[in-house]
Image (tube, coloured by chain):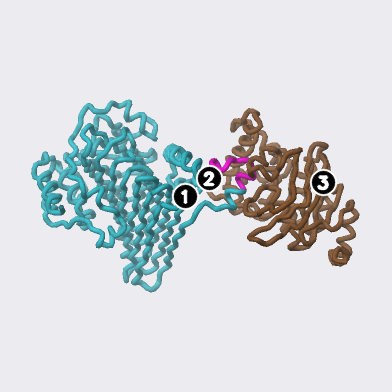
Amino acid sequence: MLSIKDLHASINGKEILKGLSLEMGAGEVHAIMGPNGSGKSTLSKVLAGREEYEVTSGTVTYKGENLLDMSPEERAHQGIFMAFQYPVELPGVNNTYFMQASLNAIRKARGEPELNSLNFMKLVRTKLKALEMNEALLKRSVNTGFSGGEMKRNEILQMTLLEPSLAILDETDSGLDIDALKMVSMGVNSLRSPERSMLVITHYQRLLDYIQPDYVHVLSGGRIIRSGDKSLALELEEKGYGWLQQEAAA
Amino acid sequence: MSAALLDHYQTLAATAPKAHVYQAVGQQRLSLVELPNRKQEAWRYTPLAPVLDYQFAAASREDGLLVPEDVAALRVTPTDHVCIVLLNGFFMPELSTLPVQAGLEVLDLAQAIQTSAAGIERLGSLSGECLHLFGAVNAALTGAGVYLRVTEKLTQPVELLHINYSFDSEVLSNPRVLVQVEANANLTLLEQHAQFADVLGMHNGVTEIFLSEGAELIHPRLQNDSLRTRHLSSLHVQQAASSVYKGTTLALGSAWSRTEFHLDFSGGHAHCELNGFYLAGDQQMQSMHLDVLHSVPDCSSREAFKGILYGQGKAVFDGNILVKKDAQKTDARLSNDNLLLSRDSEIDTKPRLEIYADDVQCSHGTTVGQIDPEMLFYLRARGIPKAAATSMICQGFAAELIAHCDYPALETKALSILQERLAPVAANL
């Protein structure tokens, strides 16, 4: 599904990712954990195609193709979805209109028929119900005046609508209370399938109680310094990141 | 040049068909006015050559030029609603749908003057203070304008449709509109300046609005004139105690466009909301001038203006709120936000608050920005191509303002014009 080899990336001339490598197979859920400033968000932004980040060396191959050659919209068309850590407010842009435009842009790029408003509304209502979201959010401007929890649920709603092949969750748990966290996790778990891979980026182990990863990686100083199964997350919860960073330095 | 231009308009005034006595007032004023020039604060940033370098001919009444189907295609209201049509500035009863219900009178202005209709004596009492050339030209040359008088609460909106269409290339239309909303009556007046054909020339309209105590007027306006015309609208509003005026002007068309709002409160607890949106692209200049006068206590006003500029588009926002010494407890908020899509576009924005009272709440703010890269990335990350995403952000920016029209058919029309204009621009950014 996704193969990252020796990835170096920088912003404004400052190198953040310093030789990151990661292999993800279809159907796998990988968690990336790490302290602040380790490069977690940079990784998600590079994967989603944020142009401010410059990839100086290394390769990223997605479904056998060079991901770094694709524009952000092409990546979305190819099935990549990033749930934003800080979803963006779009004043004056109706939420339903936005989601319909998004789904149809992706369907169009894949040569699938676009959904009309009626069929789209039917679809979005079923997804909304599963996330226990308030339908009023559909009528508002995208993320405008949403609470932190509403924004994150709105991200997950988009994810369930777009049914990506590779979902990247960028600190989706930050700023969520426990109920919202459960709801978001439920949405994510409902999408788990043998064809779909997920990259869960998080600062805390807590999210991994609800979304159980197949693999856990620790990112520090722009590289993965340790990989393991979900027990690694528990170990980190107990001991913090310090011991691994010391080991890596040694 | 200036003497020749004044001579030209004086000759036009002297030879114009005399429809009513008010034209004599205009003709007299023409001998007093000064030409607008850029040393005057009100014209400082407005290029004047497009309107002062031409000696326009006066538009004449053109009966039979349009048929009712032409009008039906331009309307935003259902065909059974009242629709007042002014063609080249002349009220055309045969093209209009005139009221049969109580509470609304629509009169030919010339006839209203001749028959001394109730309230007609107010004609010119607001615009009289505005002594610029085009105000005087309007008064001198205006023929059959329209007088609307509302005496009840009307549930159905009334449409006011201006169409400029002439086979002669450079003609000047001078529509004159007088609106009187009597005590506790209300009206929604949907005003359209519709594009019927790609015409040259100039629209020079003057509208006076009087709101009596407790009266309410909702007044959305869509200016979508041909992209080669010049357009000048002067609106004068006077609000008595506890009246409400809500005006939303969307200026999309015209090569050179200036909308002037002159608003004055004569009684307490009145509220006014002035909203405006302008779109300025290549070979376009849009300007908005506000002159809001708080001279009595306890009134509130909200002024929100937004603009999108692209290519070599130019816009001017000159918003002035004057709070006089006795206007205590005034609450006034003025904002102007601009989205620039190109390096060559230009906005001159000048929000001004002049406050002489000491117990007031007033604020003003201006922003000038570009497309937010965070917004653009968010949309693209959701699969929406760059051009469509750019267009969507612009539409959203405008939609917030356009929603103040409170009339979906007009909003949809404005948004689709905007979409059509911006799509090719967004594709080339």
Q: Amino acid at mark 2?
A: Thr
Q: Nearer the viewer, mark 1 or mark 3?
A: 3
Residue B120, given in percent of the width and then of the height, sits at 20, 47
Disc 2 from disc 3: Cα separation: 35 Å
Q: Is residue B88 visible?
A: yes
Specify the quadrant of the image occupied by residue B224. top left
- Look at 35% across and 50% down and name the residue there: B286
Q: Residues at badges 2 and 3 in contact (C-beta under 8 Å)? A: no
Neighbor class of circle 3 (other Cα within 10 Å; few <14, some 14-19, many 20+) is few
Disc 1 from disc 3: Cα separation: 41 Å
Q: Quadrant of the C terminus of chain A?
A: bottom right
Q: Which chain is brown?
A: A
Chain for disc number 3? A
Specify the quadrant of the image occupied by residue B385. top right
Question: In this orientation, which residue lies closer to the viewer: B318 or B200?
Answer: B200
Q: Which chain is cyan?
A: B
Q: Label 3: state its secondary structure.
A: strand
Residue at which label 2 appears: B390
Q: Which residues are magenta?
A: B378-393
Q: Label 1: state its secondary structure.
A: loop
Find residue B323 and name its label: none
Residue at which label 1 appears: B341
- Look at 65% across and 40% down and name the residue there: A74
Question: In this orientation, which residue lies closer to the viewer: B422 or B142?
Answer: B422
The magenta stretch spans residue B390: yes
Residue B207, given in percent of the width and then of the height, sits at 26, 48
Residue at which label 3 appears: A23
